[in-house]
Amino acid sequence: MTDGSQSLDVDRRNFVKAGGIAALGTGIGGRSLVQPSQSAGDDSEGERESVKTICSHCAVGCGLKMVVENDALVGQEAWTDHPINQGGLCSKGASLTQTVNSERRLKEPMKKEDGEWVRLDWDEAMAEVADELTRVREEYGPDSTMWMGSAKIATEEAYLFRKLAAFYGTNNVDHQARICHSTTVAGLAATWGFGAMTQSVNDVANADANLIIGHNPAEAHPVMMRYVQEAKRNGGTVIVAEPRFSKTAAHADIFARFRPGTDIAFINGLLYHIVYTLEAHDEDFLESRVYDWERVKETIADYDLETVEDITWVPVETLEEVAEALVDADVSSVEWSMGSTQHTVGTQNIRSYAILNLALGHTGQPGGGNNPVRGHDNVQGATDMCILSHNLPGYYGLGQGAWEHWTNVWDQSPQTSGSITYDEMRERFESQELMEKNGLTVSRWFEGALDDDERKGALYQPEQVKALVVWGHSLNSLSEMKRVKEALENVEIVIGVDPFPGVHGALPEREDGIILLPAATNHESEGSVTDTSRSVQWRYQAVTPRHNSRQDFELLTDLADRLGFGEHFDYDSVEDVLREINLGVRSIGLIGQTPERIKAHMENSHVFDPETRQAEVTDDHDLAGEFWGLPWPCWHDEHPGTPILYRDDVHPEEGGHDFRANWGPEAPDGESMLRAPYEPDWWDGEVEGVPQYPAYTTVLPDPETPAAKTIPIEYALSEDRSVYDAAVALAEDGYDVDPEEFEAFDNPQPDAPTGRGRARAAVWDQPDEVPVHREPVETPRPDLIDEYPNYEKQEDFYRLDLDNRGHQEAFRDLAEEFPLILTSGRQVEHHGGGYETRNTVGTANRSPMMYAEMHPRVANEHALETGDWVWVHAEPGSMLVQAMVTERVNEEEIFMPFHWAGIFEGESYADRYPEGTEPLVIGDSVNIGTSVGYDVVTNMQATKTGLCRLEPAADADVPELPEAQQSYQRQRGYTR
């Protein structure tokens, strides 16, 4: 067998058993990276074993097996009975062995001192990190730190990270979800109660029509694309709505090319045709299960198809064709990713998708629903643990009740030795006001670290950010990178934790004040991860950490101890952390996914049906009825999980659900927020709308049995008890519950603890009650600004001011200087900020060039050919990249991938990395030039709607690329 760091010469059929598009079969130079091997026990020498693990790139949740020999990772093989991917992997997943074995990893703790990188031993490094964080806390206060967590670490480690920030005394803690799907969570949660994918990736195959908007699964989630194609083979219609003719669009039955930033107008146009022309909306569904549909009807009346064509550039005929395809479908889904979320109106984009699905009555059934497809392998798990500046784990918020719940959990948990009260926790913060105040976000943390500049408003905390902790986060993912760079140079200390040295260590021009800690990769540690379908899987450790790296679990618990609160982090194992999560995260039902149950699924993957993701076993089998990964909510240790949210035709004990009754029994206007009665097949009689069961999110079981039923959960699922019965029982047990408030709901029936409510078509607690079009901050259509203005200034918004409307007015004439639209997206070979994939031979070799896609006519105007160097100038900054001439983009648009770093405005900074760790391939980051707008609900950055212009580069401008990159480009004919 060849060394795992080399390409493995094996027939690709060994891992691409699932078929699908070409991306599933990508390897290096036509050769597969998946190595078949003898499993443990079959090898004659008895030294080789296969370890099941989960891919550490996107969130589809693909399984694979790592081949290990004498604690060395020597290859991969297909996990053919894994119910999600059945052995298939994309080029990223197929190259994981090379990533783990990469020589470009950070091998020792490093410190920048007098302009040079100096090695430290672990005790020195951790002592200095703890001393610096203690110093900053004592000198400036706990809010003078910014803690950037990770979507790449295990759920247990993500939980520890948020808990650590709480004990440190700050809410300035955030992670990648802020800049990928924060608007999804806000938009969907505001509509029907939970902010997550309603289906599974497998269930996409059951859609009669699938509207894919702002998502390019053929490159971003290749294994999921097989289910899109399966739906098409089943007779379904695939609709792709995108500004760019992507690889996914090439597989579409209908392609609608719209102007970036006009999603809401596009959706409202579809609704106009469905409601006013076709009269095909589902009136019964809307009447019984949706609140304030009439407000939507009034709003969409302004979006006739001619108006929408003018705004979006989509022809009337195409709008009609898309709307009619959705109407003709018995069931349809809407699927999106960051192309939809990264806008100033991102939250409203997502609400509009949900409203479209509700209007058709297609929500909450197989093949139907809303599918926000998450990016990083555990961004769903890390989000559920709320490495977020406005929430505690489980989306509990930051109010006193949330803090009381979590201090109760941390006090009662048998997994640690520490005890704490709410009052003691409050003392760790500067004040109760700051304890309950949203912190700074990943997207705009840099403004908290900058001195006054032209764009900075007020800072609503006592001191600026003085210390930055970057834990598994790529800073080249952030917009306004010139200001990010200034902030990195302005703080007193930068602490980075990652398997590869990142932008945080190399981008800033500073002589000292940087400490880099080498983290183990995901395959050198273990823990649970939650895929985009809400299913929880266990990632087993394949080998011990390479070089002198350490596991995140070990680093977090060590740091907590050195900071003085180690008694709250003295877990015996990662499994014990999950048991504490089972105890505390009751809001979304992350209860029944115990370590034992998750591992049982991993070991018995062969019994799960890939079509339904349900175990096909006899009724007396331990896994009978269970769905793969026990997708949340999973209400207790025998619950099967909930594969489809809001599906009301299934018994709640078997995974049934309903819209969450999240806003009380009545809306502010007095209308009922509870669903109309109905008669399901699984119940003998009528089931009524009921509120959430009292105290279901805060009542704890015996901490020794954290997944056991509590009173509200037991009574909810019971067939002969009611909401009122639960209130009475809780009051008798000493809980602060008034049974009289629930006396009207004395109807025994089985429910999810979240009740049976109505979805909200219109909302009363967001800037727009119903989504309406608003022009981007940087727009090529200034003539539309006055009719469709962006949002007015907000003060003290995540501790900063936000003024989209002011920027929009200042940029009113920007298109005169920058006439082309600048947007960004993904490449199949790279992921996130590219730290791993640009340091892995297989993926770096396959995609060795940072480029700007431009239409042939635009290229001709500038005398450019593919491979030529070109300046892309934008208002925030300039990028020097290579041209990619293609008709994927139209004549008004420039597209650039966002995975790149190592060059900054044309200047290489590869020599600033510790020796031997500079990336194999480098490039300027598109986020130097992306827009300065942000979503007004979540602070999501708006990277899809900037403006730019092109300028051919002079020979003297061209930076020197690494030798490997030059070689890869020569092989592919990109060098000019």
Image: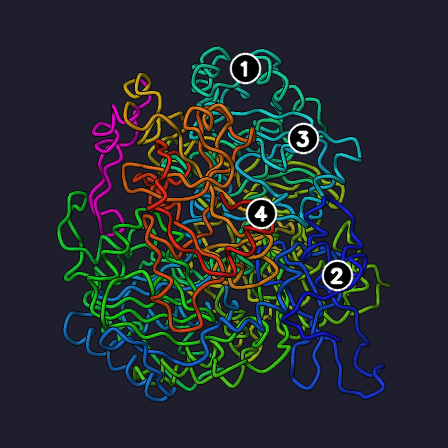
Residue 800 falls within the magenta-colored stretch: yes
Quadrant of image for the N terminus: bottom right
Up-down: is 868 above or below 235? below
Question: Residue 973: x percent and y percent?
Answer: 58, 45
Instruction: Give the spatial CA distance, label 2 vs label 3.
Output: 27 Å
What mark, if any, has residue 220 been given in the picture?
Answer: 4
Instruction: Give the spatial CA distance, label 1 vs label 4.
Output: 28 Å
Q: Amino acid at mark 3?
A: Ala
What mark, if any, has residue 315 been given in the picture?
Answer: 1
Q: Is residue 639 left or right of residue 246?
A: right
Q: Nearer the viewer, residue 976 or 166?
A: 976
Q: What span is in magenta?
A: 787-815
Mark closer to the observer (4, 2): 4
Residue 10 falls within the magenta-colored stretch: no
What mark, if any, has residue 82 been given in the picture?
Answer: 2
Label 4: which secondary element: helix
The tag earlier along the polypeptide, 1 or 3, is: 3
What mark, if any, has residue 252 been given in the picture?
Answer: 3
Binning the other alpha carbons within 10 Å of mark 4 as few (below 14), some (14 to 19) or many (20 upward) gives many
Residue 884 in view (yes/no): yes
Label 1: which secondary element: loop
Q: Residue at x 48, y 10 (%)?
A: 306
